[in-house]
Amino acid sequence: MNKYKVVIPTFIRPKALAMLSPLCEIRQWQGHEPIPKATLFEWLRDAEGLFMTGHGIPVNAELLSNGPNLRVVAQAAAGFDNTDIAACSQAKVPFSNTPGPVVEATADIAFGLVLSAARRIHEGWNWVLSGQWEKAEMQFGVSLYGKTLGIVGLGRIGSAVARRAQASGMKIVYSDPVRRSDEDALNVRYLPFDELLGCADFILAMAPLTPENKGMFGAAQFSKMRPCTYFINSARGPLVDMNALCDALRQRKIAYAALDVVDPEPLPADHPLLKLPNVLVTPHIGTATDETRDAMACLAAENLLAGLARKPLPSCVNRDVNYR
């Protein structure tokens, strides 16, 4: 039996590799630095499948033209702002992502940032480490109970965050280009974007990144927030104008920011944001649990094997070219 020819330009979880190895002839990049573009394109010349993890490699017309035999591109990530979906459809190459497995872990981090920011948990740890425990009182935080959480982008992850916030006694408002038909069941209330900015105590960015909403949180939007507002971003860094956010924090136009995503990533060590006292940044760890990464990789492997066999992908973004 001839094996499918597959290119994997990054690290892959062992469980997914075990799924692919019996059926695939794999060329995998083993270097710690990113795979050189010329090497990737050379490998793609006779490849039938490409397994991605979303680490900075653009899937565009140029890449696809160098993989004339590609049957499928499978990415072990929910977001796909690195991908030109129209170019994939034009090349008749199904592209898959893994949105389902990321929901609960990403919601954990998003709500964890809400709670950590509100109660200044990491400042408390730093206070203990500095030996100041009994010397003075650190700055107090705020309670979550009774506060309003405004979620911008109430998809599956946003809805999962809403459940966690409601368990802490928070009220949920949301803004989204498409209103939910299940608002009553979710116990959430729709508000136009600008109105949400002015009334929510905590504002959580959970929208997918598109060309239209890049920089949607800029100077004008931060000026509509109140000095007591906590801003949280667990979606994509480029949703936020980082300079405007720094200014808003520095001038106390908002109280605090907690971010799991920034722009650029990684954030330079001398970035002005990191010099501010009212900010918490984590290094894009929304899906960073073994269970979640295994589930993402295994779903990506399922998508890849389905596409290689010209069968319907379980999770296909450009469904117009999914196999039937």
Image (cartoon, helix red, strand yellow):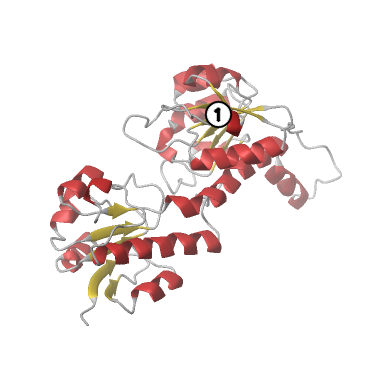
* Residue toward you, 243 or 282: 282
Looking at the image, residue 112 lies above or below residue 300: above
Looking at the image, residue 65 lies above or below residue 21: above
Can see residue 281? Answer: no
Looking at the image, residue 165 lies above or below residue 171: below
Left or right position of 170 against 272 = right
Q: Position of residue 175 (x, y in %)?
A: 49, 26
* Residue toward you, 37 or 232: 232
For the N terminus, the image quarter is bottom left
Left or right position of 12 against 307 = right
Q: Residue at x 53, y 25 (%)?
A: 248
For the C terminus, the image quarter is bottom left
Can see residue 96? Answer: yes
**Seen from this angle, which residue lies furthest right?**
134
Q: Position of residue 281 (x, y in %)?
A: 56, 44
Q: Position of residue 148 (x, y in %)?
A: 65, 26
* Residue toward you, 142 or 134: 142
| Amino acid at the residue labelled 1 | Glu
Q: Position of residue 18 (x, y in %)?
A: 40, 76
Quarter of image, res 217: top left
Left or right position of 153 against 39 = right
Disc 1 target residue? 183
Q: Residue at x 44, y 32 (%)?
A: 240
What SS does tag 1 mark?
helix
